[in-house]
């Protein structure tokens, strides 16, 4: 019986370590990886909007900011310039 108790104690210790590792991974995921992902997505959106605003300004001669390009759908009509 003592051998079984020792095995159960070792198993319980291993399971506790696995659970603490899982909690650590989840904390890393929610506190680091998710915010980094959100910042990356916003950065990509910002860059695309800056490129769109620059192209629109070049084609039409109007002064459109990146902020405007983020929220407004810019369209160029034929013969706009």
Image (cartoon, rainbow, N blue to C red):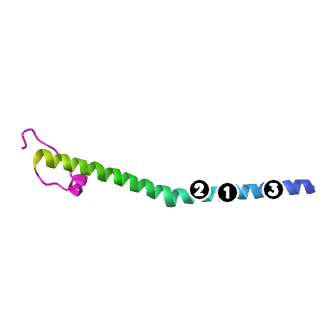
Q: Is residue 73 visible?
A: no
Tell me which corner region of the image, top left, top right, bottom left or bottom right, holds residue 3. bottom right
Q: The magenta stretch spans which residues?
A: 62-81
Q: Which mark is residue 19?
A: 1
In the image, residue 64 lies at what x, y percent? Answer: 16, 54
How far apart, in angstroms, are the residues tagged by discs 1 and 3?
Answer: 14 Å
First reached walking from the N terminus: tag 1 or tag 2: 1
| Location of mark 2 (residue) | 25
- Which secondary structure is most common in the magenta stretch? loop
Q: CA distance from mark 1 to mark 2?
A: 10 Å
Residue 39 visible in this rendered orientation of the protein? yes
Q: Residues within 10 Å of mark 2 (few under 14, many from 20)?
A: few
N-terminal-most mark, 1 or 3:
3
* Disc number placed over residue 10 in the picture, else none: 3
Q: Nearer the viewer, residue 69 or 57?
A: 57
| Left or right position of 9 against 50 | right
Q: Is residue 32 left or right of residue 16?
A: left
Secondary structure under tag 2 reads helix
Instruction: Let me know if residue 73 is in the magenta part.
Output: yes
Classify mark 1: residues with Cα within 10 Å, few (<14), some (14-19) or many (20+): few
């Amino acid at each position: 019986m003592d051998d079984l108790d020792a095995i159960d104690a070792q198993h319980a210790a291993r399971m506790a370590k696995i659970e603490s590792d899982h909690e650590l991974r989840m904390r890393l995921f929610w506190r680091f990886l998710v915010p980094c992902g959100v910042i990356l997505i916003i950065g990509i959106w910002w860059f695309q909007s800056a490129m769109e605003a620059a192209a629109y300004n070049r084609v039409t001669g109007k002064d459109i900011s990146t902020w405007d390009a983020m929220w407004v759908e810019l369209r160029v009509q034929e013969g706009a310039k």
